[in-house]
Image: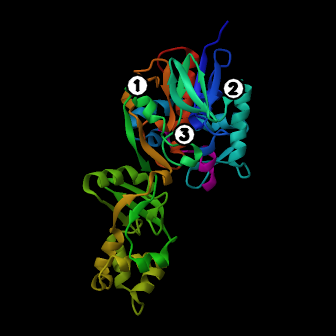
Amino acid sequence: MHKPTIAIIGGGPAALMLACSLDPGKYEVSIHEKNAALGRKFLVAGKGGFNLTHSEDLRQFADRYTPRAFIYPFLQAFSNSGFREWLKSIGIETYVGTSKRVFPVKGIKPIEVLKAIEAQLLKNKVTVHYLHEWKGWQGDALLFDNQGKSVARKADLTVFATGGASWKVTGSDGSWADHLSAKGIRVHPFYPSNCAYQVEWSKDFIQKYAGSALKNAAFRCGTLTRKGEAILTEFGIEGSGVYPLSGAVRKALSEQGSAALVIDLKPDLDHQEITVRLENKGNLSVKAVLEKKLNLTPVHTALLKQYTTKEDYNNPGRLAAVMKHLELTVCGLAPIDEAISTVGGIAVEELSVDLELKKLPGHYAIGEMIDWDAPTGGYLLQACFSMGYTLAKQLNAGSSGF
């Protein structure tokens, strides 16, 4: 008896989880990957510390996503704890770090996680076609470019998992958008997310302090506030403390041409306590009080000097106010290819509840190619894995919904 065929286009996290979770007794599954290897972006993400997911409570976890209502059902079907159990089942033990982020145990490298997943693909009898770049359709067949040669393949079901538009070196370039747009599917323009923000520093300041970290600070844009760390660069500012504010920064840039990024350099002390410590300085200089009584680093002190007049710097109350509300003007975002992730892609309204494209029956979409957003910290990967798992569960059940 002929088993229905499923063609998965793309070889990233969402695609890999889908292929690992589909029932080989029900489907013949193939992956079509434009690169010579799977999981290129997955491996790149692991270079800075392989943060697989986060250990937050599920409801709080879901609050990190926009739009929340779109992502939450997938997290319910395959949660962060479920993901950790699945990783354990394929031989990848994990642990929760001090930041509550989840990592493979010490000694397990990103390539070893990928190899464990690839072993599941082999076990699931998944066929992988490498160097196959999707180029649209030829009649009712999928059209691929295989090193200059056109290849047409038919499938009973097609799942697009082609990624967003950042890190083109990994193959994630958003070139698929034109093919879907031609079918009448609404695809929103791509914009950088989880990226550096452009700040026009004074030349003397940034030459001396580029690469310096602002630790244990709180960062705010609009109504969003996050505690964390950020790095000052010649371009501006970046890091885990500011990435979660990407949506608010983009909105302000779009509407006003600039965005106010407010930094609280001492979030654990209120204005009054800081003022008292500055007032009771005795024979110490202001600089010495900042470093000895308020534990500020030289870059904190230099930043305060940049954003205060001499009069305010020597006035305890005014200096305390700036320390609690140091406002940087963000004038732009890093180029899209330098962003960790992107927003934009297929409008969620184009998808049914089971991730099927309403205008293309039998065609599904998962992962970052859909227009949703999340900060770094394991949230991006988790949503991709959750979507892949949830779609597999629905297809295995043969039902029309979750």
Disc 3 crowd rating (10 Å Cα; few below 14, some 14-19, many 20+) is: many
Q: Is residue 176 above or below residue 44?
A: above
In this rendered view, identify the residue nearer to me: 157 or 224: 157
- Front disc: 3 or 2: 2
Task: Give the residue pinned by disc 1.
Answer: 183
* Amino acid on which disc 1 is placed: Lys
Q: Is residue 55 magenta?
A: yes
Disc 2 crowd rating (10 Å Cα; few below 14, some 14-19, many 20+) is: some
- Front disc: 1 or 3: 1
Image: magenta residue range = 42-58
124 horizontally vs 191: left or right: right
Which badge, 1 or 3, comes first in the chain's sequence? 1
Alpha carbon distance from label 1 to label 2: 28 Å
**Residue 2: x percent and y percent?**
65, 9
**Residue 279: x percent and y percent?**
34, 84
Alpha carbon distance from label 3 to label 2: 24 Å
In this rendered view, identify the residue nearer to me: 211 or 71: 211
Which badge, 1 or 2, comes first in the chain's sequence? 2
* Amino acid on which disc 2 is placed: Thr
Whether residue 79 is visible, yes or no, is: no
Farthest bottom residue in view? 283
In this rendered view, identify the residue nearer to me: 52 or 217: 52
* Amino acid on which disc 3 is placed: Gln
Q: Secondary structure at mark 3?
A: helix
Task: Give the residue pinned by disc 2.
Answer: 127
70 horizontally vs 101: left or right: left
Task: Give the residue pinned by disc 3.
Answer: 382
- Front disc: 1 or 2: 1
